[in-house]
Image (tube, rainbow, N blue to C red):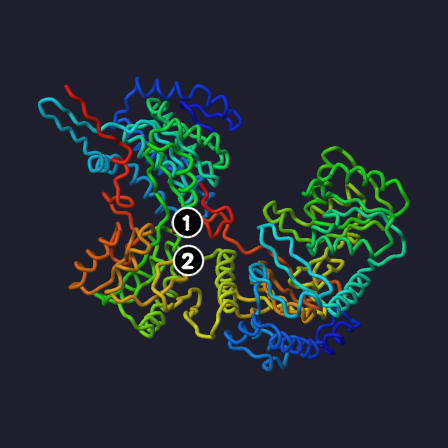
Amino acid sequence: MILANGILYDTKEQPSVLEGLQEKLTKTLIEQRLDKETVINAFDALGKKVAQGELNDLIDSIEFDGKEKYIDLIERMMSKEYLRSKTDLELDGRLLSNSSLITRQVPLGIIFHIAAGNMDVLPVASVAEGLLAGNINILKLPSVDSGLTVRALKILVDQEPKLKDFIYVFDTPSSDISTMKKLADLSDGIAVWGGDEAIKAVRQLSKPGTRLIEWGHKLGFCYISGFENEEEELKGLAEHIMLTRQLLCSSCQVIYIDSDSFDDAMEFGKKFLTYLDNASDIYPIREIGAVAEITLRRYSDRISSHIRKEDAEKDEFVLTGRSTTVTVKKDNSLELSYMYGNVIVKPLPSKDLSSVLRKSKEYLQTAGLICSPSKRTNLTETILRCGIERVTRAGHMSEFFEGEAHDGEFALSRYSRYVNIES
Amino acid sequence: MKYRRKLFSTKDIYDLGPTDDLFVKAIRENCEFQYGNCEAYKKILDLEGFSPERLNKIEDLSDLPFIPTAVFKKNRIFTISERKMAFKATSSGTSGSFSKIGFEFSAAWCALKMSLRVTSNRKLISLRPCNYIVFGYKPNRHNKTGVSKTAFLTTMLAPSLSRTYALLYRNGKYEPDLEGVINAIVKYSKRRAPVRFMGFPSYIFFVMKMMEDRGLKVQLPKGSKIMMGGGWKQFYAEEVDKSIFYDLAKRIMGVDDDDIVEFYGAVEHPVLYCDCRNHHFHVPVYSRVLIRDTHSLKPVPNNTPGLVNLITPISYATPILSVMPDDLGILHDGKECGCGCTSPYLEILGRVGLKDIKTCAAGAADILNANGGNI
């Protein structure tokens, strides 16, 4: 399904929609201006419709726990109050003028959003940010989109027809390089969500000079150096791991223990396994196929590593709980776990923390920090200097904070530019 | 190898109890051979803390480390030199990687004896010549897949008048020739000799659907059979119930439910499973099946779903004595079937997998989907 100028088209009409698109976009760029309040009111209305159940048929088809919490979050993130505070914070509207020069923040122009399928509302959210900054938005749907995005955006333009020339949605597959390139060439900026491969592909696709706004995949970890309230902190961390299934950028994959002793890591691993199992009673993983796949992959990797090994020395120990595992490893690199409640524990003395984190600087985003109050300021500072964007309490690694930056940036300012005008 | 020879000479192939002791001895004999001759296998057993002497009774089989078929896809593991092998077979891996499993001459001999017993048990051996329609590859020197070999071998169960292949090798690749197949079905339906189909169920289903859409119906000669192997995996997504298949075969080609025979097997577990008249895969004496818990990998009781662990002493050339494919399955009590066979039967539920998984953890998408990077 294609959405262009407020009208839905069948996928096969793509060539005719693309024809003359450039002229149309230029005309909109010159003749129309998008007012921030118009966008905010339209999304506020959309959020209310979602909360009233207008999209429930589609949302119900998505399988996940905590649906109500999810709908609440959509409504909150589309509310006037939230969007106003977001634009106030992220669009500084800086106006600088001296006698002869004015500096002003304006929309970037046309933004091509290449959305990933990792969250169902992500494509709509990405377009929303583009609109708030005043841009024309071309969205390429992820291959796994359930139809939610086009429906939601159609409701939005029907609600506020002033937006219709600012939203274009295509369901072109990313393998259709020539169309992807055509859309990229029309744009001033490309916002890409996805893993390394997706981002590399977009870098190849775009012309030098087109602004790339990359929202890449990341790895989260937790660092433990003493406790404030051990029971509560470990319970919080375990529940975070089970609730997010370790599937998010911000999810904890590795727990580092401030020690150079493997035995300390083992001791912690054994203790933490109980917390993890208890958390999995609260947030059980019901997908048997997923559990089986992860278990089989873990076991296959173990058997394969036996074959490769020169000696019979073990460098990792798997502690198996009722429905979770803790793998204690001797090395200290930041890596992806097997997810779904299979966390990794490694010893990492604080003196080595920065050198280890710098090795993974491209993937750093969220660190959960558990430590004694006296160490918090210094550890936070060290971690931040290594390139981390968020340092939170361990149980809050994936929490949504109002006013937070994303991957170290304010999206709206990335979707804007500054112009200088001599009077 | 004397225990293996004895096991493969068993007459009543679905009476497991009396062969338990023999089976364990054959596995231990095989395990000792692998341990002494295959360096990779020795490392696996050593690092898993197992030694062949621990195999004494049937319950001990669950302690024997099993090797996931994925490991054979990533590594080439042979116990005897490739020169001494009778033949090698590869799995029909759709993901690009495939297993390569070797068989020595004595294993091939066991396999032949097994195949004859299993197929004659299902009354598939006949002297009446037939026309074969093979829904698979025409064997050629570029194709070593086990499936193409099995499909070809099944055309030996009765003398062949003709063989029509649905996948033809043209210009270096396989192309389906379904029109050719439909023409052959119509042509041979008018002859007196029975028609025998062999191949992937999904292709056969597809051809029958095409015939239905065109309003084509035939009555195949008496004694015609549909033999299927190669898995229902294409069906999982479509969720086509097997009964729809049987119903279609009756309506479109006049083939009775009784004349539809399905095989199950894998290159990594080359034991021929053949369904009973109720279309259940009872475990033959050459094999034992354990279902393991999807988290702990410990054996679970019958009628509980889990990962499938297949055990057989058939081959010495590759350590495939205990393997685990990517399948989820259930082992049912034999008496539940009602066909009279007491051996438990294996039901394959589908592949393990993370369907439509949504993740933004770095590297996760690339690992979880073959087509990672999902933009």
Q: Residue at x 8, y 22 (%)?
A: A99
Q: Which mark is residue B280?
A: none
- Residue A336 in the image: above or below residue B28: above
For label 1, the SS is loop
**Residues at marks 1 and 2 touching, judged by CB atoms closer than 8 Å:** yes
Report the amino acid beneath label 2: Met
Say which quarter of the image contains residue A379. bottom left
Q: Are marks 1 and 2 on the same chain?
A: no
Q: Residue furthest left?
A: A99
Say which quarter of the image contains residue A412. top left
Classify mark 2: residues with Cα within 10 Å, few (<14), some (14-19) or many (20+).
many
* Residue highlighted by disc 1: B359
Spot occupied by residue B185 in the image (x, y as percentages of width and height):
81, 41
Spot occupied by residue A3 in the image (x, y as percentages of width and height):
44, 27
In front here: A390 or B93? B93
Q: Quadrant of the C terminus of chain B?
A: top left
- Mark 1 chain: B
- Mark 2 chain: A
- Residue B151 in the image: above or below residue B285: above
Report the amino acid beneath label 1: Thr
Classify mark 1: residues with Cα within 10 Å, few (<14), some (14-19) or many (20+).
many
For label 2, the SS is loop
In front here: B202 or B138? B138
Q: Residue furthest front?
A: B83
* Residue highlighted by disc 2: A339
In front here: A260 or A146? A260
